[in-house]
Amino acid sequence: MAVSLRVPEDVKKRVDRLAEARDTTAHAFMLEAIRDKVEAEEARAAFHKEAQARLVRMKKSGKGIPAA
């Protein structure tokens, strides 16, 4: 799947500078950044899904951790 992104010039310059400092290409740098963001969002979604399931169980059972 081919994807085309319009990257603002200032962001492109920052990516180029950072990629060069890490001895990689701007393309590889952006792919890593996208992967990192996708993984973080997937983890966040899983966390919220688990929290929602626990809230439902707590409300059903009436059991929870008392506030101090």
Image: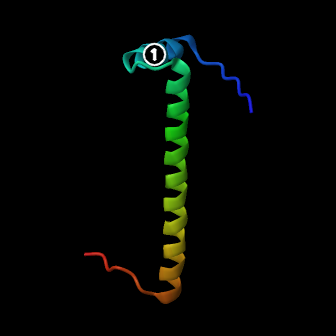
Point out the image quarter for the C terminus: bottom left
Say which residue label 1 marks. Answer: 14
What is the residue that sits farthest to the right in this orientation?
Answer: 1
Which residue lies at the image location 54% right of the left edge and 77% below the top edge?
Answer: 56
32 or 5, which lies in front?
32
**As displayed, is residue 66 above or below residue 51?**
below
In the displayed image of the protein, which residue is found farthest to the left?
Answer: 68
Residue 40 horizontal/vertical position (percent): 49, 46
Q: Nearer the viewer, residue 23 or 31?
A: 23
Residue drawn at x 49%, y 88% as measured from the top left = 61
Q: Where on the picture, by quarter, is residue 1?
A: top right
Task: Count the labels in the image.
Answer: 1
Q: Amino acid at mark 1?
A: Arg
- Determine which quarter of the picture holds residue 17: top left
**Residue plotted at (34% across, 79% down):** 65
The image shows residue 7 at horizontal and vertical percentages of 60, 18
Against 33, is 67 above or below?
below
6 or 61: nearer the viewer: 6
User: Where in the figure is residue 21, as x and y percent of width and height?
Assistant: 37, 16
Secondary element type, mark 1? helix
In the rendered view, does 52 fall on the left or right side of 65? right
Which residue is the extreme one toward the front?
23
Density class for disc 1 (Cα within 10 Å; few <14, some 14-19, many ≥20) is few
Q: Position of residue 49 (x, y in %)?
A: 55, 64
Name the residue: 49% across, 11% down.
13
- Give the answer, above or below, for where 35 lies relative to 14: below
Asked which colour scheme the image uses, the reply is: rainbow
